[in-house]
Structure formats: structure tokens, C-alpha cells
Amino acid sequence: MHSEIHLALHHDRAAALRAEADADRLADGARQRQPRDLRGWLGWTLVEVGLRLATASPPPRAP
């Protein structure tokens, strides 16, 4: 394969990958703005708090 053809194919493929990455980035940004994400974030935060409370050592007993 001639080097010019190889380089042209490389540039074409790189441009296609950049376009795909941009489309993915835009789609991901649109998904993050949905209210469901806030609900999920809040849910996982409550799970984390619950786990911290469940694994916390009990206060020392007074003699």
C-alpha cells in the first residue's frame, strides 16, 4: 500500500473516531441532565450513609 493512501485512510479513520467520541460525549451530557440521575445519586448517598452507620463502632460503655 502506498504511504499516501495509508496516511489518507489513517486521517479518515481518525476523523470518524473523533466524530463518534463527540457524539458519545454529547449523548452522555444529555443523559446526565435527567432528573433520574439526581435520584440515583441521592439513593447511593443514602446507601453510603446507612453502611457507615451500620459499621460504626458502638460508643464505649461507662463503668
Image (cartoon, rainbow, N blue to C red):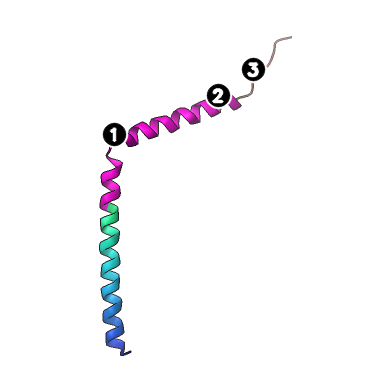
- Asked if residue 39 is among those painted magenta in the image, a careful observer would answer yes
Q: Position of residue 56 (x, y in %)?
A: 60, 25
- Asked if residue 1 is among those painted magenta in the image, a careful observer would answer no
The part of the chain drawn in magenta is 26-55
Q: Mark 3: few, some, or many residues within 10 Å (few <14, many ≥20)?
A: few
**What type is the residue that disc 3 sits on?**
Pro
Q: Mark 1: few, some, or many residues within 10 Å (few <14, many ≥20)?
A: few
Please name the residue that numbered disc 3 is placed on.
Answer: 59
Q: CA distance from mark 1 to mark 3?
A: 39 Å
Which residue is found at the position 64% from the left and 19% from the top? 58
Q: Position of residue 18 (x, y in %)?
A: 28, 64
Q: Secondary structure at mark 1?
A: helix
Which residue is found at the position 35% from the left and 31% from the top? 39
Marks 3 and 2, the one that precedes in the sequence: 2
Frontmost of labels 1 and 3 is 1
**What type is the residue that disc 2 sits on?**
Leu
Please name the residue that numbered disc 1 is placed on.
Answer: 35
52, 62: nearer the viewer: 52
Q: Quadrant of the C terminus?
A: top right
Residue extending furthest toward the bottom = 2
Marks 1 and 3, the one that precedes in the sequence: 1
Res. 53 mark: 2
Whether residue 37 is situated above or below residue 59 in the rendered picture: below
Which residue is found at the position 30% from the left and 49% from the top? 28
Marks 1 and 2, the one that precedes in the sequence: 1
Q: Quadrant of the N terminus?
A: bottom left
**What type is the residue that disc 1 sits on?**
Pro
